[in-house]
Image: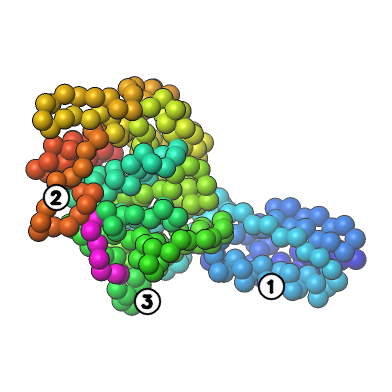
Amino acid sequence: MISKEQVITILQTIKDPHLHKNLVETGALRQLSIKEHLVSLKIALAKIKTEEQMKVQQAIVQKLKEQGAESVGLRFEQLSEEEIEKLGGLPEDDVSPLLSKRSKTVFIGIASGKGGVGKSTVSVNLAVALGRLGHKVGILDADIYGFSVPDMMGIEERPTTADNHIIPVERFGIKVMSMGFFVEDNSPVIWRGPRLGKMFNNFFSEVNWGELDFLIIDLPPGTGDVALSSHILLPDMKEIIVTTPHPTAAFVAARAGEMAHKTNHEIIGVIENMAYYQSKKTGEIEFVFGRGGGEKLSNVLNTELLGHIPLQQPDENSTVFAPSVYFNDHPIGRIYDEIAEKVVHHIKK
């Protein structure tokens, strides 16, 4: 039967692919159990859900079986930032410039508890409004199952490549990246957890974003794999929670907010979308989806209510096709400008 000492000796021959130190030096072994010919391990790496992790996994399994293990159970977790720092940190060339310590980019995740509340519309228009204020802005459509940002912004072209990196599409001065650029004919994406996390990581490691002041991240609704990956990869991300006025929508949205709290992401505010409908003919206001959801949610999450967005369509523009973008000559566009100013003020405090 293979011994603990043999396992440790094997781990000394395998390096963390990002720290370039062997797995004993990095303190990677978190759990080890040996029962007859079954070896179970938990290993911590600097980065997980990557191709390099798969190579490490294959190497460990192969070497353990060569030493007599008939079966190997292997799980991975990520080293903490503190552990990585104590080990010398990640080499700068192993880190996306956007994620390096020198980067001044502020990451703002737009989250919701459920679909259908207009989260992507808010993401697009907040990004455009921040651009109107003179900031360098990007938007990452990370809603991998429900990507919609390219269509909302009227984007018909596809990203290009240069120096082995993907160059985002620019629209209204905003750099845009989306899963929608890589799917033909609006085909459904049928993926499970690990591939989702890998794709999210690739949006940073393989995309040349250039210099950005803000990167708006349109997160999938709920608290699934991509949301978890965002919390791991972007520990300093700030979040805005989107809800409708309906009490049930606010109740569900609170889950996304609690996830942000538990992962130490700062919630900078709540946006209540579809807050009311105002007739263009009479000016009469109707609260189609009820009232009070935004206030209730902001109180629960102990944060600011950034604004109420009414239920309305952007004006049709014969010269610019952007079916979900409100420009600054539209009343809702001006509301987004006010929200963008609040966001910038909050971050600069």
Residue 157 covered by magenta stretch: yes
Q: Element at badge 2? A: loop
> How much space separates mark 3 and mark 1, taking CA atoms?
27 Å
Is 124 placed above or below 171 here? Answer: above
Instruction: Find disc 1 in the rendering and name its residue.
Output: 59
* Rendered-image quadrant of the N terminus: bottom right
CB atoms of marks 1 and 2 within 8 Å: no
Residue at (29% x, 69% y) in the render: 158
Could you tell me residue 174's position as x and y percent? 22, 57
Residue at (27% x, 24% y) in the render: 287
Q: Amino acid at mark 1?
A: Ala
Which disc is residue 329 wearing? none
Q: Element at badge 1? A: helix
N-term mark: 3 or 2: 3
> How much space separates mark 1 and mark 2, taking CA atoms?
58 Å
Residue at (42% x, 31% y) in the render: 249
Can see residue 168?
yes
Q: Quadrant of residue 300?
A: top left
Could you tell me residue 8's position as x and y percent? 76, 64
Mark 1 vs mark 2: in front: 2
> How much space separates mark 3 and mark 2, taking CA atoms?
38 Å
Instruction: Find disc 2 in the rendering and name its residue.
Output: 316
Residue 284 covered by magenta stretch: no
Q: Amino acid at mark 2?
A: Glu
Question: In the image, 1: left or right of 107?
Answer: right
